Structure formats: C-alpha cells, structure tokens
Image (cartoon, rainbow, N blue to C red):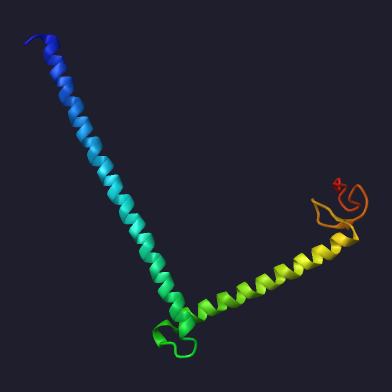
Amino acid sequence: MSYFEEMTQKAREVVATAAEKARGAADSAKISAAIIAEKRELDKNYRAIGQWYACEHKEDVPEAIADVIAAVRASQEKIAELQASREAAESQEASAQAEGTVCPVCGKISDSKFCPHCGAPMGE
C-alpha cells in the first residue's frame, strides 16, 4: 500500500468517526429538545389543574394550600386594581388630549409648539 492510499484510508476513518459522533450529538440534542418540550407541556397542564382548582374551591380550601390560594387571590385583586388604574389613566389622558397636546418628554399638557415646562418640541 502506498503512502497516499494509507493516508486516504486514515482520512476516511477519521471522517467516518466524526460523522458518527456528529449523528450521536444530533440525536442527543433532539432527545433533549423533546424532553424540554414535554416538560413545558407538563407544566402547562399543572397550571391548568391549579387554575381550575383555585376557581372551583373558593371556600373549602385545604389547610396545606391555603397560603398559596390566598396569594393567588391577592394577585388577582392586585391585577384588577392595576387594570382599573390603567383605565383611569387612559381616560384622563384622553380628556387631556382634548384640552391640548401631551409633552412627549415630561408628560405635561400644553397647546403651544414647545412645552412651557421642559422646552421640548410638542410635535404636531
């Protein structure tokens, strides 16, 4: 066997080994991705069960999860308060828009071309 034939044979072996390792790594990555996807699905299902339970059992809550249910209800109340304050701010901004233009920098209302508070151009 000549030197070039020997080198070609070794190169083929190296390429075959590298290809086999790459296939193994790709298979491992696919399996890892499938595991992560299933864990996400499992978490989604657990959340659905918890949400259903919290909605169905408003009064008769077991002692073991009473704190968690209380935290969920507190969060729901806080979200409702924040949504109400956002709606109030939006309606206030809408009424302010009728009176003049809101400054994009400081938020003050004016009907001039430049903000009298910070000097920024009001935009048209």
Query: So how many labels did they put on this image?
Result: 0
Q: Residue at x 43, y 70 (%)?
A: 47
**Picture quadrant where residue 19 is located:** top left
Left or right of 51 on screen, residue 106: right
- In the displayed structure, 124 sits above or below 37; it is above
Q: Nearer the viewer, residue 28 or 120?
A: 28
Give the percent coordinates (x, y) of residue 43.
39, 65
Give the percent coordinates (x, y) of residue 11.
18, 20
Q: Residue at x 9, y 9 (%)?
A: 2
Q: Looking at the figure, which quarter contains the N terminus? A: top left
Residue extending farthest to the bottom is 60
- In the displayed structure, 4 sits above or below 45; it is above
Residue extending farthest to the left is 1
Give the percent coordinates (x, y) of residue 6.
11, 15
Q: Residue at x 31, y 53 (%)?
A: 34
**Picture quadrant where residue 29 is located:** top left
**Picture quadrant where residue 26 is located:** top left
- In the displayed structure, 74 sits above or below 5; it is below
Residue extending farthest to the right is 112
Q: Residue at x 66, y 75 (%)?
A: 81
- In the displayed structure, 31 sits above or below 25; it is below
Left or right of 58 on screen, residue 109: right
Give the percent coordinates (x, y) of residue 48.
43, 72
